[in-house]
Image (cartoon, rainbow, N blue to C red):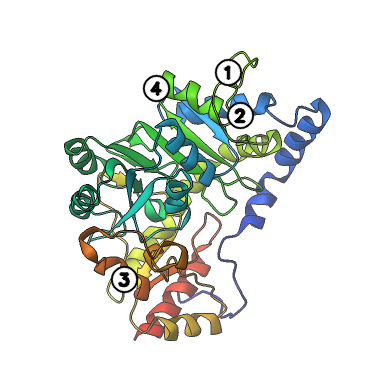
């Protein structure tokens, strides 16, 4: 695609964390040293500072940092009092942590399908899922909207369906922090939003980390208690059963530095996505991002036939790929006995056989992008 790009088959990284590290190395080392110097390794001042920054970015009143994105989902379940006898609807085409948190809370995950025009949860399948839950004698408690690959789900449509069944909408924004719909940021699209700062995320720390975002004072207080073993606001009584779900101060310090370049990195991710769209739009099925949404492109996932052939062809050119997700959750051993909306999830099954994620990050230069584009075009021709 680019006549002046150098010919090379040197391996490229799928996510280039080292390039980001070189950009921020001095700031991050200084931030970590400050934590070591003050010695408040748990709930140090950086934790509160990051919570305020993230809450402001998400246009909500509260951010409660925690130890992982999975714990963020579990804490949300616990704060809503969801447990035995409750059904929580979740798409099967996502990472297993979404369903795992539901099961750990004691509730029943009911798997639903994704929409035909994308990778996100299908509101029509959600309605079928709630009806299925009722026939099984379960209480429709919530639907977990997963913002897959960095694009927000259709929260307006989901809210209508959930309200009809008296259920909550929970945002699983593990892949989408920084995205928006109609200018409304992720974090403000549902009453409670769980996100992840796993290292490979668009905003990632140097270990595990997560957060719950909410505008509710009541929920914020409850989440803080639950993430700290159930202790009360004064620290004198353990008034409920909770978990050890706190974020380490060093991770908060690292994220504060990464947040300073986050907007620039998101702009560059969108530039890569646009170059892919322009170069691949006539040869493979591409991810669609409606005009009213801004994606953070946590993954750039295409759909191809003869996927194994394409993967091998790209690997021969030094281009890594990833399969998110080659097996839906309802086909995983631990989850095979949970109910399915409508009795089958055909779109999740079809996507599992055809999806292929390409390298995308803020440091993927135009020559590398063209290497990917040219290799994909050659592989599918």
Measure the alpha-carbon separation of dots 2 and 4: 19 Å
Measure the alpha-carbon separation of dots 1 and 4: 17 Å
Give the residue displayed 70% in from the left and 26% down from the top. 44
Measure the alpha-carbon separation of dots 3 and 1: 45 Å
Residue ID for mark 3: 349
Residue ID for mark 4: 216
Count neighbours of disc 1 (C-alpha within 10 A) and say few if under 14, some if 14 to 19, many if 20 or more: some
Residue 158 can be seen, yes or no = yes
Give the label, 1 or 4, closer to the camera. Answer: 1
Measure the alpha-carbon separation of dots 2 and 3: 39 Å
Residue ID for mark 2: 228
Does label 3 or label 4 sit earlier along the sequence? Answer: 4
Labels in figure, total: 4
Establish if 178 lies above or below 284: above
Establish if 180 lies above or below 52: below
Confirm or deny contact between disc 1 and disc 4 (CB under 8 A): no
In the rendering, at what x and y percent does residue 89 appear?
31, 49
Give the residue displayed 63% in from the left and 36% down from the top. 244
Residue 53 can be seen, yes or no = no
Kind of element beneath mark 1: loop
Q: Nearer the viewer, residue 81 or 58?
A: 81
Q: Quadrant of residue 214?
A: top left
Count neighbours of disc 3 (C-alpha within 10 A) and say few if under 14, some if 14 to 19, many if 20 or more: many
Kind of element beneath mark 4: loop
Give the residue displayed 56% in from the left and 57% down from the top. 363
Q: Nearer the viewer, residue 8 or 126?
A: 126
User: Does residue 329 appear to the left or right of 29 in the view shown?
Assistant: left
Tag of residue 232: 1
Count neighbours of disc 4 (C-alpha within 10 A) and say few if under 14, some if 14 to 19, many if 20 or more: some
In the rendering, at what x and y percent does residue 68 appear?
57, 44
Measure the alpha-carbon separation of dots 2 and 1: 9 Å
């Amino acid at each position: 695609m680019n006549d002046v790009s150098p010919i090379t088959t040197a391996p490229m990284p799928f996510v280039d964390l080292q390039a980001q590290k070189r950009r921020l190395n001095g700031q991050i080392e200084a931030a970590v040293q400050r934590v070591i110097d003050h010695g408040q390794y748990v709930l140090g001042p950086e934790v509160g500072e990051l919570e305020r920054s993230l809450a402001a970015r998400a246009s909500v009143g509260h951010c409660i940092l925690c130890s992982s994105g999975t714990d963020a989902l579990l804490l949300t379940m616990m704060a809503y009092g969801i447990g035995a006898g409750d059904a929580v609807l979740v798409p099967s085409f996502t990472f297993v942590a979404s369903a795992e948190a539901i099961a750990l809370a004691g509730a029943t995950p009911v798997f639903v399908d994704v929409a035909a025009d994308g990778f996100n949860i299908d509101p029509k399948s959600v309605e079928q899922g709630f009806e299925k839950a009722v026939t099984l004698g379960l209480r429709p408690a919530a639907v977990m909207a997963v913002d897959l690959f960095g694009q927000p789900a259709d929260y307006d449509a989901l809210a209508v369906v959930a309200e009809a069944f008296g259920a909550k909408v929970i945002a699983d924004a593990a892949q989408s922090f920084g995205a928006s719909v109609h200018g409304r940021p992720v974090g403000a699209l549902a009453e409670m939003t769980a996100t992840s700062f796993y290292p490979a995320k668009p905003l990632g720390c140097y270990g595990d980390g997560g957060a719950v975002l909410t505008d509710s004072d009541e929920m914020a207080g409850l989440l803080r208690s639950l993430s700290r073993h159930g202790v009360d606001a004064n620290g004198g009584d353990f008034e409920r059963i909770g978990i050890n779900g706190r974020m380490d101060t060093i991770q908060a310090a690292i994220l504060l530095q990464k947040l300073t370049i986050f907007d620039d990195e998101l702009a560059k991710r969108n530039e890569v996505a646009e170059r892919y769209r322009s170069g691949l739009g006539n040869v493979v099925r591409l991810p669609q991002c409606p005009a009213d949404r801004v994606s953070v492109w946590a993954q750039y996932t295409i759909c191809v036939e003869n996927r194994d052939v394409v993967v091998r062809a790209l690997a021969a050119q030094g281009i890594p790929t990833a399969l998110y997700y080659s097996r839906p959750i309802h086909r995983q051993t631990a989850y095979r006995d949970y109910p399915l909306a409508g009795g089958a999830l055909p779109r999740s099954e079809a996507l599992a056989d055809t999806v292929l994620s390409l390298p995308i990050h803020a440091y993927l230069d135009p020559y590398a992008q063209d290497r990917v584009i040219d290799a994909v075009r050659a592989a599918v021709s």
